[in-house]
Image (cartoon, rainbow, N blue to C red):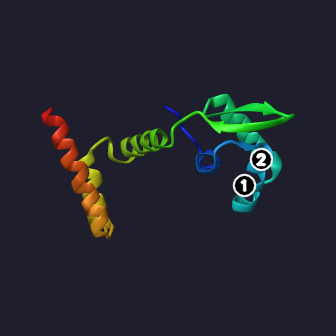
Amino acid sequence: MFKLTDAEWGIMEILWEKGVLSTMEIVREMEETKGWKKSTVITILNRMVEKGSISYKTKNKSKLYFTMIDREQARIDETRTLFNKLYGGRAGLMISSLLKNEHLSKEEIDEIRKAQALKVGLHRL
């Protein structure tokens, strides 16, 4: 399981959306969206390579970065961490909190119902 910082999530989102990118392409994206300097981006990229969340190949003296983790798996891992931290792993408490404190749309309520139906179906197997 990878623990990504907010800064790392920003870079991962760009790589998941656009695929393989050079250092300078990532720097430009992060300058435009976050106002980061080149040195900041390079520091974060190096940290991410060390952690194994991204890797790179060298082509014509340029580093081309790509993700090493699946977007959906990263979301699941992050959700699990947050869920355990905030609700002690208690799904009922989380859903109750959402229902009390949020105005859920019909689509969001339908998603919860579908997820519950799927879980019930899996338990019967």
Image: 55 above or below 44? above
The C terminus lies in which quarter of the figure? top left
Residue 14 position within the rendered picture, expressed as x and y whole percent measured from the top left: 63, 50
User: Are the two marked residues, 1 and 2, in contact with CB atoms closer than 8 angstroms?
Assistant: yes
CA–CA distance between discs 1 and 2?
Answer: 9 Å
Residue 64 tag number: none
Task: Say which residue appears at 82% left-offset and 49% top-offset.
Answer: 38
Spot occupied by residue 57 in the image (x, y as percentages of width and height): 74, 31
Q: How many marks?
A: 2
- Dot 2, crowdedness within 10 Å: few (<14), some or many (≥20)? few
Q: Is residue 1 left or right of residue 8?
A: left
Residue at the disc numbered 2: 40
Q: Secondary structure at mark 2?
A: helix
* Depicted 51 relative to depicted 104: above or below: above
Which of the 4 quarters of the picture holds residue 48?
Answer: top right
Amino acid type at mark 1: Met
Sequence-first tag of 1 and 2: 1
Q: What's the residue at 51%, 43% (across, down)?
A: 71
Q: Nearer the viewer, mark 1 or mark 2?
A: 1
Within 10 Å of disc 1 (Cα), the crowding (few <14, some 14-19, many 20+) is: many
Q: How far across and how far down the image is residue 60, in percent?
A: 86, 34
Q: Which residue is mark 1?
A: 30
Residue farthest right in this picture: 61
Q: Amino acid at mark 2?
A: Thr
Residue drawn at x 23%, y 53% as measured from the top left: 114
Q: Position of residue 105 (x, y in %)?
A: 31, 69
